[in-house]
Amino acid sequence: MAKSKINYRKPGNELLDFMINEGKLLWFVNALVPELEEGELFDYSAEQESMQKFILDAPFISYFGKDALPRPGAFIGYRIVDRYMQQNREISLHGLMQEYDPQKVLKGSRYKPA
């Protein structure tokens, strides 16, 4: 359902495009089912079309070693989108899903990893 709401008018091959789209999907799910624990949210998976090393489900990311969590790109994308929505409270869920410029989302989030 969430994938049908994303505006894909600007497809890209950049990692940021995939991260933001994955983050929007997760944010959409969280908006509809806010009682989900974060662990449950990140285990939610649909057919993925993304950069395998950073987006797809796996026991761990081999690039980072066995202690790394799976799907770091989706996790960071979700954090960026969440921050974007916190910084821009006037934007609706529909508005988020229609925003197709990942650079705008990243800049508008003022995201700074902890």
Image (tube, helix red, strand yellow):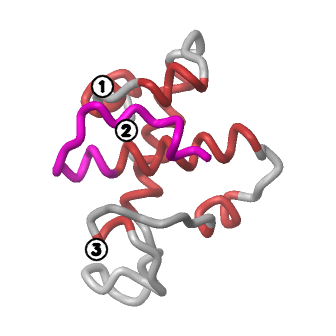
Name above or below for residue 14 compared with residue 71.
above
Amino acid at circle 3? Lys
Q: Nearer the viewer, mark 2 or mark 1?
A: 1
Q: Residue furthest left?
A: 13
> Label 2, on which residue?
112
Give the magenta-colored segment's residue range.
1-18
Of the numbered discs in the image, which one, if any, rests on residue 107? 1
Q: Residues within 10 Å of mark 1 (few under 14, many from 20)?
A: few
Asked whether residue 51 is drawn in magenta, I would say no
Disc 1 and disc 3 in contact, CB within 8 angstroms: no
Mark 2 / mark 1, whichever is N-terminal: 1
Q: Amino acid at mark 1?
A: Lys
The residue labelled by disc 3 is 53
Camera-side residue: 3 or 80?
3
Work out which residue is located at the far right of the displayed protein and give it: 35
In the rendered image, residue 12 lying in the magenta stretch gets the answer yes
Horizontal relation, residue 90 to residue 60: left or right:
right
Q: Position of residue 45 (x, y in %)?
A: 56, 66
* Disc 1 secondary structure class: helix
Compare marks 3 and 2 and give the one earlier in the sequence: 3
Q: Is residue 5 above or below residue 64?
A: above
Q: Which sits in the foreground, 12 or 79?
A: 12
Say which of marks 1 and 3 sits in front: 3
Answer left or right for 38 relative to 4.
right
Q: Please tell me which of labels 1 and 3 falls first in the chain.
A: 3
What whole-number distance in Å separates the C-alpha atoms at marks 3 and 2?
22 Å
